[in-house]
Amino acid sequence: MRAVIVGCGRVGAGLAAALDRGGHRVLILDIATSAFDRLPSTFSGEAVRADGTDEDALLRAGAHGADAFFALTEGDNRNIMAAQLARESLEISTVLAKINDPVRARAYAELGVATLCRTTLMTDTLLGFLGLVGSGDPPIHHAKEHAHPAEAAGDATMAPAPAAIRMVGEG
Amino acid sequence: MFVIVVGGGKVGYYLTKELIEAGHEVVLLEKTRARAVQISDEIGSVVLSRDGSEGSSLAEAGANRADIVAAVTGDDEDNLVICQMAKHHFSVKRTIARVNNPKNELLFRHLGVDEIISPTRMILGAIEQDIPVHELLHLADLGSGDLELIEALLTDGSPAIGRTSGELPMPEGCTLFAYIRDGKAQQVRPETQFRGGDKVIVIGRRECEDALRGTLIGEDEEPAAV
């Protein structure tokens, strides 16, 4: 799989490193080169200093036609815009934006962008830790227009299984 | 008319003031508290110190009965989200976004923003009309971004004048495919001989621009003293 990640914070860097270890091709963008210090020295993907909300910059970095796109910066609106750019202009169908405002997270799933809401995720986890019931909202709202990638037929590459097992499954 | 203005910079401030003077009902959302207080000291209590891209702020401002939402912050991504939330969450009839990066115009329109104002584009247009066009003019990007459509006006001094298309040293990957003479577009053939005043249309890779300039425009001259 070829994945594009915008935002090299802890989550972005962690995801990039994990996908890279799993043998996937990773392109990670951040507006500050210092952010790439979070990547492990073994990282073999591409790290490019670029603004993930700038179409030209994304094209130049080679994001067009990737299999998956994750917008994980600290700005909800930046993530929303990057994700919609990816879907509309970069022809990427599996697109996820981290949106910390639960209202916007729900609204944008309806507009075709899968959203991850850290606020809901953490609140519900904390309530669960206390043995209490959370909001019942899922941590990821799936985009209304396309299927969850792991459910999509034949796409086993998203599953976090080791390469050897995947090959047996596909063979 | 009930208008919600989001973003209390210079544009939002003067817009709000003008709209009030014209007798419209206005609410201005400005997320920086100090700036919101400053504006409300000057033009009265029409200012809410809220982030306009949050659903709850738009609700508080009365978005469900607004005729127009104008997103005029300095950040394109905020303006996009404000308009989309207004449109899809509050069914606002008309949304207006200020766009700084002219490349975003198409995306915003595609994503449902009704009206897009690009100061960059406007100023660029004014400048391009003012200067004589003897440079290569970028017309559009093609395909995945590597190729572009370029127009070149052949003026006196262009090495292409008097030569045929077949004789011109074209950079690899560039195609001369049409020219405009006397207001008529014509296809370029190998035997087409160019004249001064012809506008030549080329498809080529961006990195070929310099070579293309040498072929069609000639060496850089010092601009004439004004």
Image: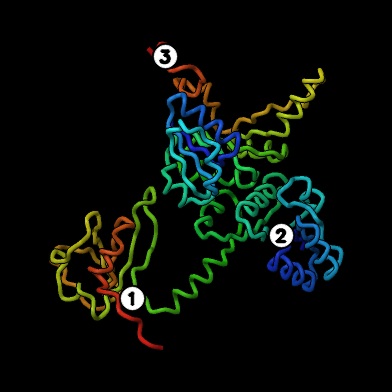
On the question of residue A67 being in view, the answer is no
**Label 2: which secondary element:** loop
Q: Position of residue B169 (x, y in %)?
A: 17, 64
Q: Amino acid at mark 1?
A: His
Marks 2 and 3 on same chain: no
Which quadrant of the structure image shows residue B66?
A: bottom right
Q: Amino acid at mark 2?
A: Gly
Chain ID at mark 1: B
Of residue A40 and residue B155, the one placed in the foreground of this image is A40
Q: Position of residue A143 (x, y in %)?
A: 59, 33
Q: Amino acid at mark 3?
A: Ala
**Label 3: which secondary element:** helix
The relative height of residue A155 versus residue B43 in the rendered view (above or below) is: above
Quarter of the figure with the N terminus of chain A = top left
Chain ID at mark 2: B
- The residue identified by callout 2 is B7
Real-space CA distance between mark 2 and mark 3, rounded to the nearest whole angstrom: 54 Å
Identify which residue is drawn at 47% across, 25% down: A21
- The residue identified by callout 1 is B134
